[in-house]
Amino acid sequence: MDRGVEILAIFTLIFSTETASAQVGAGDPRSARCTTELARATLVEGSVVDRRVPARAVEIRFEPRGLSLLRPYAPGKVPVVLVNGLWGSPREWCRMVKDLEADPFVSERFQFLTFGYSTGDPIPYSAYTLRRAIGDLRDRLDPDRSNPAWNRMVLIGHSMGGLLCKMMTQDSGSKLWDLMTGSPVENLAGPAKARELLYGSMVFKPMAEVRRVIFITTPHRGSPLVWGPIRDVGTRLVLPPTPLQQARASLLASNGPAAFTRTFREGLATSIDELAWEHPLLLAIDGLPINPNVKRHSIIAERYGTVRPGGGDGQVPYASAHHPGAVSELIVHAGHYCLDDSRVIDEVARILKEHATP
């Protein structure tokens, strides 16, 4: 792709997508059903389950926060968590959820949730918040761990969201922690909360609840579009979350810079930094072992319809979207933003039906 076209593509992505909120009025082309469903999805912050129906759905503000059920909780149904990518929001899943719920087999067996988060935050931190949100929601809805449906959870991630989903199935060991410091956490001085936050972001085990993951145009090894000036502009649009900044400052002050790697001393990366082609963090995540009991599937968009050298969806090349451990891989003739594509939705439905069949 011509470099000028790449620049245009990135700036279109950055400035044409609402990253904080969007007002849906009476003239919005989205269906009323989508508005109502996603209203329920965004009424809840954190892991709170809200069964209220919004009084004026047309005035819903999409301010995604945490893990949210789209419908009242159904104990016998398997949770399916939908995670959007960079600059996205739960609203992107509207068409897919509507179509999946129209299938009686799917709707009788599965319930859908969205995870809203600040997509510019460091990838490990966003994965940490998703991991905690899933645990907190189960503590609330299945405190005695007696509901078997919770142990068959399906995660579906679009683009960067797929990376968060993958991290729910991985054992990090010390590999990510070592990118930040060579010292064990117990040897670091500083506030306990600061150490716990950084340690929780970089050291984790597979979640027992997750049994299947669907990757949709996921950049496992980054994107060549995230380079130089484009990355600089995108990074200026987001700031690392305050809790992480405070934790980093506290630990640097308590231990001195020699206790940490140069990368950590220089500052916290944003997700835009980390999505650069073959970024060390992405390569480290890509090399982490995955729970062998988790089945993975890939849906990969290809603008030319067939895999070809240098091909891809316009943002993520096939070489990055391909996941060697996937039990199935579907190539669709589409661009990166393909969640409304009927072939993508049909493949998700097929996988869910496979998941529901012993």
Image (tube, rainbow, N blue to C red):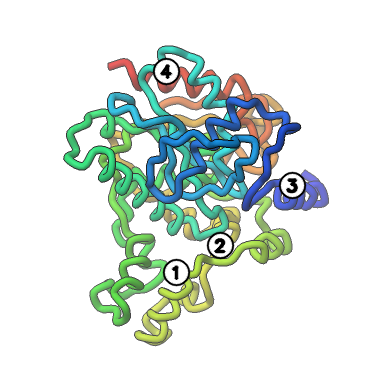
Could you tell me the amino acid type at mark 4? Val
Which residue corresponds to mark 2?
Answer: 270
Q: Earlier in the sequence, mark 4 or mark 1?
A: 4
Could you tell me the amino acid type at mark 1? Pro
For residue 328, the mark is none
For marks 1 and 2, give the CA distance.
14 Å
Q: Residues within 10 Å of mark 1 (few under 14, many from 20)?
A: few
Q: Residue at x 43, y 30 (%)?
A: 71
Mark 1 vs mark 2: in front: 1
Could you tell me the amino acid type at mark 2? Thr
Q: Secondary structure at mark 2?
A: loop
Q: Earlier in the sequence, mark 4 or mark 3?
A: 3
Q: Earlier in the sequence, mark 1 or mark 3?
A: 3
For marks 4 and 3, give the CA distance.
33 Å
Q: Nearer the viewer, residue 110 or 40?
A: 40
Q: Residues within 10 Å of mark 4 (few under 14, many from 20)?
A: some
Which residue corresponds to mark 4?
Answer: 106
For marks 4 and 2, give the CA distance.
37 Å
Image check: 116 left or right of 176? right
Which residue corresponds to mark 3?
Answer: 16
Q: Nearer the viewer, residue 26 or 350?
A: 26
- Would you say residue 325 is visible in this rendering? no
For marks 3 and 2, give the CA distance.
20 Å
Mark 3 vs mark 2: in front: 3
For residue 243, the mark is 1
Q: Secondary structure at mark 4?
A: helix
Image check: 36 left or right of 68? right
Q: Residues within 10 Å of mark 3 (few under 14, many from 20)?
A: few
